[in-house]
Image (spheres, grey):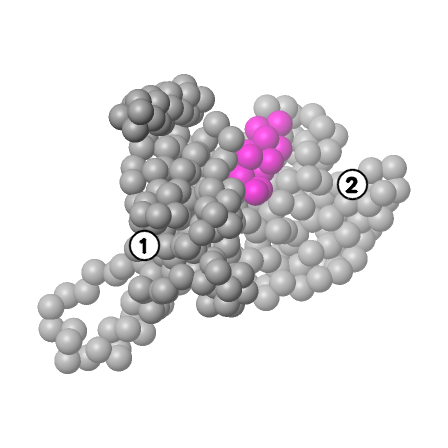
Amino acid sequence: MKNSFIKIMVAAVMLLSTSIHAQIKNAKTETVKIYGNCGMCETKIEKAGNIKKIANVDWNHDTQMATITYDATKTNQDEILKRIALVGYDSDKFLAPDDVYNNLHGCCQYDRVAKVPVKEENKTTAGNDDHSNHGNHSETTTAVIQNENQLKAVFDNYFLLKDALITSEGTKAAAASKELLTAVNNVKMEKLDMEVHMVWMKVLNPIKEDAEHIADTKDVKHQRDHFTTLSKDIYALIKVSKYETPVYYQFCPMFNDGKGANWLSKENAVKNPYYGAMMLNCGKTIETIK
């Protein structure tokens, strides 16, 4: 009887695995340790890690081992583990924020093994041991610059697109949007800080969709319609990742049948991308992002 039950369970697991692989294209499966205690942990870990048709996490609270299956062309292990860390659960790669861990239910507060957050490793040359403080400062600076540079090209091309719309040049706007798409596709998500990464995952597809629409037409009116929603997503992104200089969030009350629309600018002086020369100075700065 016992052997029959085991065979049924093995068959069920194999069937589930086959089903998951069928749902996820380019499926890659890996096993990793994620720290937690109970069924409540299991629910939160799997909910945080799962993305429909892209990633599936199956966590066992007895062994603390997770089987992760994901579309290798759309995500990776680091991205999945970062999302899980952000809801309170450590892995051997990423440490959950202390405040999030401390807010877990008492039964979910597992024994923590890692003591410091995991950061991007930076290679240092031999001989730095004698200058450890200087080396640590250098590594931190390098990591910050590396993370910022991941999105700088995205922001720079957004500003070029905005400038093309100010002058009502549909051809230039389309070209700038194509460059924006290239910059978006070149971002290495695994190198983003966790907070930035979480926003990036939410805005990535909408940004690509709007940029594709703008790039596929020279009709400035259609481009401006998509620029409104593009600007909202770029705003959410720049708020958490920042830019090298202050950025001004501006508002036009007239566009979209009086509903208004926002945009981002590197200059505080208002130059309206929704009306161009017709109402160049219509609008105001409502927020300065530093």
* Quadrant showing the N terminus: top left
Kind of residue sitting beneath label 1: Lys
Front residue of this view, candidates 142 and 29: 29
Which of the two marks, 2 or 1, is nearer to us in this view? 1
Q: Which residues are magenta?
A: 202-213
From the viewer's perspective, tell me whether residue 282 is left or right of residue 50: right
* Quadrant showing the C terminus: bottom right
Instruction: Give the percent coordinates (x, y) of residue 79.
Output: 41, 45
Q: Is residue 189 magenta?
A: no
Instruction: Give the percent coordinates (x, y) of residue 266.
Output: 61, 57
From the viewer's perspective, tell me whether residue 216 is left or right of residue 3: right
- The answer to whether residue 212 is visible is yes
**Mark identifier at residue 93:** 1
Residue at point 45%, 22% (across, down): 23
Instruction: Give the percent coordinates (x, y) of residue 32.
Output: 30, 45
Residue count near mark 1 (Cα–Cα under 10 Å), binned few <14, some 14–19, many ≥20: some
Residue at point 15%, 76% (across, down): 129
What secondary structure is the stretch in magenta mostly built from? Answer: helix
Residue at point 57%, 42% (across, down): 203
Residue at the outermost front position:
1
* 259 up-or-down from 55: above or below: below
